[in-house]
Amino acid sequence: MTGTSLDALDVSLIRASGEGLSMRVQIEAHATHDLGGLRPRLRAAAEGAALSARDFASLALDFGRLHAQAMQAMAGERRIDLAAIHGQTIFHAPPLSCQLVNPWPVAHALRCPVVSDLRGADLALGGQGAPITPLADWILFRDGAPQVIVNLGGFCNITWLPGADATLDAIGGADVCPCNHLLDAAARTALQQPFDRDGACAASGTPSPDARHELLALLEHTTRAGRSLGTGDEAVTWVARHARSLRPADLLATTCDAIGAHIAATAMLRAPAAKQLVLAGGGARNRALCASIQRGAGGVPTHHSADRGVPVEARESAEMAVLGLLALDGVPITLPAVTRRGATHARDGLWCLPAT
């Protein structure tokens, strides 16, 4: 899995027992790989740069080769039964969406079936194709009281899980707002760094009330618009404008405070019965962001997914594997009420599996 923030390629190796929605999963290994020279090429594609058909084909192949190398290194001598690849989202405006990757290098390297283009079936049936992780969240985190799983990735998405005895129909989910997109844009602008490691700079600053109010309004507008994923302008103009008047630490503090407050408010509004928030994704390492979420949660405790046996960097890549297994078992991997495709064709279970 690579997120829309283009920070790294995350790989997880899972062992699953059982079948379909009754499966149990254990994460055996996970690793993060630098995108290296592929990062600027992928960012150019995601930002709509003029690229030729040859450029896109070359980029997809090179990206597939990086996947193959990373996954083969993790597999070692193990026999792999299935590989699942998300690809890089370079465009998303349903029904149009592109998760760029050539899966064939992985099929060749691992000698196993490969599931890719995971969003395609939902898009074909009229859905948004996102968020696609709620069912996988249910499999990884379903035991216990009602809770909200918060993915602090390039674009934040949340899954609200009912208690262990509830039905699948009670599972909810939504994309919320840009998260690491904005945090990283602020770090690039103010610090000339790709990100603010652990939110250290943000933690040393003071939020600007006026700038915070303005950013909250932008984030609330994004949520009300019901956008899925996050390609295009993610309020980076707000970053550029306020970078001219705020100290770097204050700009980063304001960004973290507003994003965290909005995520917490949205999570508690959508799942008022939640007994805890479980934080995952790269943003879970940002202490200033997590502190803002905790303040906004109204006393509901927050925990890292690692406390539940799922490393924060591994959640999404492990869940891609879970979704691949569900597809192999013939289970539709998206929920109609979550991706807003209605109840029709809910059992079609479309999926594509390239043969080796």
Image: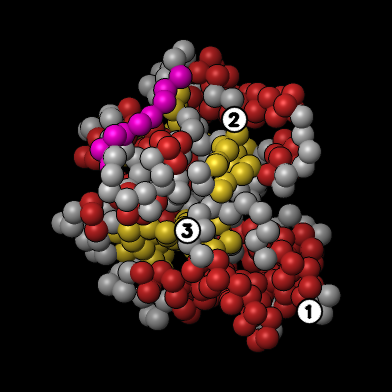
**Mark 3 Cα-neighbour bin, 10 Å: few <14, some 14–19, many ≥20:** many
One can see residue 181 in this view: yes
Where is residue 350 drawn, in percent x and y?
Answer: 35, 31
Mostly what secondary structure, the magenta segment? loop
Q: Which sits in the foreground, 55 or 79?
A: 55
The type of residue carrying mark 1 is: Leu
Q: Earlier in the sequence, mark 1 or mark 2?
A: 2
* 349 in relation to 237, above or below: above
The type of residue carrying mark 3 is: Asp
Q: Secondary structure at mark 1?
A: loop
Where is residue 269 drawn, in percent x and y?
Answer: 37, 74
Q: Do tag 3 and tag 2 residues touch (Cβ < 8 Å)?
A: no
* 139 in relation to 73, above or below: below
Residues in magenta? 346-354
Residue drawn 59% across and 25% down?
A: 102
Q: Which mark is residue 1?
A: none
Residue 54: name its quadrant: top right
Horizontal side of 264 relative to 163 (left or right) equals: right
Horizontal side of 278 relative to 168 (left or right) equals: right
The residue under label 1 is 246
Q: Earlier in the sequence, mark 1 or mark 3?
A: 3
Q: Which mark is residue 175?
A: 3
State the separation of the CA atoms marked 1 and 3. Answer: 29 Å
* 356 in relation to 36, above or below: above
Q: Which sits in the foreground, 283 or 285?
A: 283
**Mark 2 Cα-neighbour bin, 10 Å: few <14, some 14–19, many ≥20:** many
The residue under label 2 is 101
Q: Residue furthest left?
A: 165
